[in-house]
Image (tube, coloured by chain):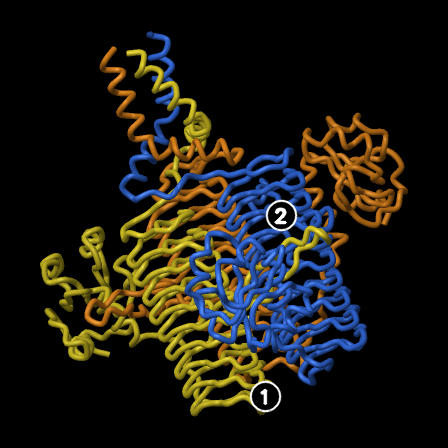
Chain colours: A yellow, B blue, C orange
Amino acid sequence: MKLSEIAEKFRLEFRGDVDVDIQGIAGLQDAGPNQISFLFSGRYRSLVESTQAAAIVLRKEDASLTTRPVLISGNPRLAWAQIAAMFDPTPVATPYVDVSAVVSDQAQLGKSVVIGPQAVIEPGAVIGDGAEIGAGGFVGEGVAIGAGTRLMPHVVVYHGCSIGEGCLVHSNVVIGADGFGFEFDSDSGDYIKIPQVYGVQIGKHVEIGAGTTVDRGALNDTTIGDGCKLDNQVQIGHGTRIDHHTVISGCTAIAGSTKIGSYCLIGGAVGIVDNIEITDQVEITAMTLVSQSILEKGRYSSGTGLMRGTDWKRSVVGFRKLDDMLKRLRRLESDR
Amino acid sequence: MKLSEIAEKFRLEFRGDVDVDIQGIAGLQDAGPNQISFLFSGRYRSLVESTQAAAIVLRKEDASLTTRPVLISGNPRLAWAQIAAMFDPTPVATPYVDVSAVVSDQAQLGKSVVIGPQAVIEPGAVIGDGAEIGAGGFVGEGVAIGAGTRLMPHVVVYHGCSIGEGCLVHSNVVIGADGFGFEFDSDSGDYIKIPQVYGVQIGKHVEIGAGTTVDRGALNDTTIGDGCKLDNQVQIGHGTRIDHHTVISGCTAIAGSTKIGSYCLIGGAVGIVDNIEITDQVEITAMTLVSQSILEKGRYSSGTGLMRGTDWKRSVVGFRKLDDMLKRLRRLESDR
Amino acid sequence: MKLSEIAEKFRLEFRGDVDVDIQGIAGLQDAGPNQISFLFSGRYRSLVESTQAAAIVLRKEDASLTTRPVLISGNPRLAWAQIAAMFDPTPVATPYVDVSAVVSDQAQLGKSVVIGPQAVIEPGAVIGDGAEIGAGGFVGEGVAIGAGTRLMPHVVVYHGCSIGEGCLVHSNVVIGADGFGFEFDSDSGDYIKIPQVYGVQIGKHVEIGAGTTVDRGALNDTTIGDGCKLDNQVQIGHGTRIDHHTVISGCTAIAGSTKIGSYCLIGGAVGIVDNIEITDQVEITAMTLVSQSILEKGRYSSGTGLMRGTDWKRSVVGFRKLDDMLKRLRRLESDR
C-alpha cells in the first residue's frame, strides 16, 4: 500500500514522497523502512529524529521536526486507530457452523453466523446476524447475542443474559455467574445461599477483556451501558449498574449493587465497595479504594506513593502514630 | 403463586390481601405489581412508601410503614433466600451423559449424574451421585467430585484433587494448578521448579466464584473447609489451609502455606502474605494487606481513605515525610 | 525407594539408617514414617525434634538437631526441588492426538506431540516436538508452540503469538487477547478501538500460572523473556516487555508499554502503571503501586501497615490532615 492511498483514504494532508510503500505500523523506536509511525505527544519528540519509519503521522506543528514523509492529523491517535485497522491480522471467519459444535435445535441462529469448533449453544439462545461464537464458547439457555457481536474462544454466558450489537468479548470472560450472596443462619451456623434470579444485560459496542467476570443480579439485572470498555480480569458484582461509555482498566473489582455513571475513567486494580453511587465523569486513579459515594465529578485517589523499602517502613510506623501525632501537635499549639 | 402459599410454605405471619399473585422478586425501587420485595434495613425505609411491590417482607416493627400486603419475618434476608429459591431460573439438567463428552471408561460415574457437552473426564475420576459436570468441564485423573456437587461450564480440576458434597463451582474456576514454587540456582542462574506433589481438598457445601484459582500444595494439600464461600477471581496459594465457614470476597489473593481460621470474613481485593496464621472470626476490610499473623479476633485494615486527587497528592507528600515529622515533633517537645 | 538411592542419585552425604523406605515428601509437621522432610531455615528448627519423618534433608550445621537419618545439603531447597520431582504425580500423556480434537490440516504437528480431547488447532499453527496441548486448549492461526512446552487444559493462544521451548502454561491462561486501547472521538462521543496488530512472544522455560492474561501489542509485540515465572491471575498489558528471569507473584497487574528488567522479584497484587521503566534486580513488595520508573535496583514499596480497624480509622483521618499538619509543624518551628 502506498502512503498516498492512506492519505487519501483518511483525507490527511501529506508532505514528502507519497509513493513510499507501507506494509505496517510500529512505534517510532521500532519502525522499519516500510512502516508508518506516529507522534502522539511532545514527550516523544526526540524519537522523531532517529526513527527509521517510512512516514510519520503527526500534528501540523510537529511537521518541522523531520524531513521524512509525514501525514498531518489534528488527532494522531485517532489516525492511528484508523490506519492500524488496515493492517489488523485478526482472523475473520467465513460464516459456518463447525461440525464439532453442539447446537440445540431450539436455538435460533441469525444469518451469516460463525459457530466455532467445540462450542455449545443451549436451547432458546438467539444468535444475531453475523455474530460469532468462538471455539469452545458456551451460550446458555435463552441467551441473546446481538448482531455482529464477537465472542472470542472460550467465553461463557450463563442462561438468560443478553449482549447487545457490535460487542467484542475476549476469551475466558464469564457473564452471568451467580452473584456473591449468602445470609448467615444462626440456627445452623451455615451460610444460606441467596439465589441470583436476575441476569446480566450488556449494551451495544461494549468491549470486555480476557478473564473478566460479570455476575448476575439477585434483585435486579446487572447492566453495562452502551460503549463501555472493560479491560482484562475486571470483576463486576451482582446488580451493579454501569452507565454508558465508562472505561474500566484491568483487575478492577466492583462490588454489588453499586451505580456508576457515564464517561467515567476507572484505573487499574481499583476497588469499589457495594451499594454506593458514583456520578458521571469521575476519574479514579490506579489501585484506589472507593469506599463511599462520589457525587461530584473529578479525580479521586487513595493509597500512598512509591518509596524505597527502608524509608517506607519508617513512614508506615509514622502512619500508625498519626492520631498520636495530631494530639501532640495540638498540645504544642495550646502550650504556645 | 399466591402470597398465601408463600406465607404458608415458610410459616410467615402476614397482613393484607394474601390472594395477590406473585410472579417474582425485586428490589423495592424496581418491583412491579406482581413482585414481592424486601425491607432489610432502616436505611431503605423511605423506599417502602413509593414501591409498587405486590407485597413486602419485613420485620414486625416495620409493618406500620405501609398499607400494602406484608409478610412478617424476624430475618427478612433469610426469608429472601428462601423465597428467591422459588423463582430461580437456573436450568437443572435431567441426568445424562452428552455424546460429545469424552469420558474415560476407567472413570466411575454415580447415579443420576449430568456430564455436559464437550466435557472431559479422565481415568480414575469418581463423580458422585447427582453431580453435574457442566459443558466443557475438565475432571483430571483420580479426581473425586462429591454427590450433588455442581460444576458450571468450563471448570478445570487437575489430577488428584477432591471436592466434597453439595458444592457449587462456577465457570472458569481452576482447582489444583501448580503452586508457585521455584528455587534460584546460582550455578545456572535459573529458577528450578519445585514440583507441587500434593493436591487440593475442598469440603462440603463450598461455593466458588467464577475465575477463582486454588493451587495444589508442595508439602501438604491445600484445604478449604466445609461451608466456605469464595467469590470470583480469588487466588488461593499452595498449601494454604482455610477452616470451615470462612467467606472470601472477590479478587482477594492469599499466598501459600497460610492458615486461616473459621468464620472469618475477608473483604474484596485483600492481599494475605504467605506462611502466616489468622485465627477464627477475623474480619478484614477491602483492599487490606495482611502482612503478619492475626492472633486475636476482630476487624483489621490497612490503606488510606478516598480523597480528591489534588488533596491526596499533598497527603502522599506528607506520608513520605512522616519520619521526619516525628523527629521534628520530638525536637519541639524537648524544646518546650 | 530407599534413602540410600536418593542420597546416591543427588550425591548427598548421609547419616543414619539409609535402608529406610521413602514413599514421598512432606513438611516437618505432617511427615509420616515413610516420608522425607526438609529443614529450610532456622525458623523451623523446633519442628525437627517432633517430626515423624523417615529422614530429614538439612544443612551440615543442623545435623546435630536430630538422631533421625539425615541427608546433608548445602541448599536444602534445591534438594527439595530435585527429590520432589521423583514423587511428582502429574500425569504424563503418551503421544497421541485425541479423536475429539479439531486439528486443521494446515497445522504442523511435531514428533511425539499430545493433542488432548476437545482441543482446537487452527491453520498455520506449529506445534513443536514433544509439546502438549491439553484438553480443550485453543491454538490460534499461525501460533508457534516450542518443543516440549506443555499447555495444561483450557489454555487459549490467539493468532500469531509464540511460546518458546520447555514452557509450562497452566489452565485458563489467555495469551494474545487484544490490548486495551481506545481513543475518544469527540465528534461521536464514542471510544474508537485501536487495533492491536502485534502479538505476544514468550521465551524459553517460562512458567505461567492459571488464569493469567498476556495481551497482544498495538505498536510492538508484548514480550516475556527466557526463564520468567508468572504466578496465577497476573495481567500483562499490551506492548509490555519483560526481560529474562523475572518472577511475578499472583494477581499482579502490569499496564501497557512498560519495560521491566531481568531478575526482578515482583510481589503479589502489585500494580505497575503504563509507559514506565523498571531496571534489573528490582524487588517490589506485595500490593505496592509502582507509579513511576525505578532506575536503581533495590526494594520498593507503597501502602500502609496492618492495623486494628478502630486505630486504622484514626490514622486515615490523620492521613487526610497530613498537609495541614506539615504547615502547623512549620509554624511551631518558626515560632520557637
In the rendered view, tell whether residue A203 sits above or below residue B305.
Answer: below
* Residue C180, picture quadrant: bottom left
Q: Looking at the picture, which amino acid does disc 2 mark?
A: Gly
Expressed as whole percent of the image width and height from the top left, the position of residue C244 reads 48, 50
Q: Residues within 10 Å of mark 2 (few under 14, many from 20)?
A: some
Res. B52 mark: none
In the rendered view, tell whether residue A336 sits above or below residue C209.
Answer: above
Chain letter of the residue beneath label 1 in the structure image: A
Give the labeled residue for mark 2: B181
Expressed as whole percent of the image width and height from the top left, the position of residue B326 reads 38, 20
Give the labeled residue for mark 1: A104
Give me the C-alpha separation between circle 1 and circle 2: 44 Å
Q: Residue at x 21, y 51 (%)?
A: A43
Q: Say whether mark 2 and mark 1 are on the same chain.
A: no
Chain letter of the residue beneath label 2 in the structure image: B
Q: Secondary structure at mark 1?
A: loop
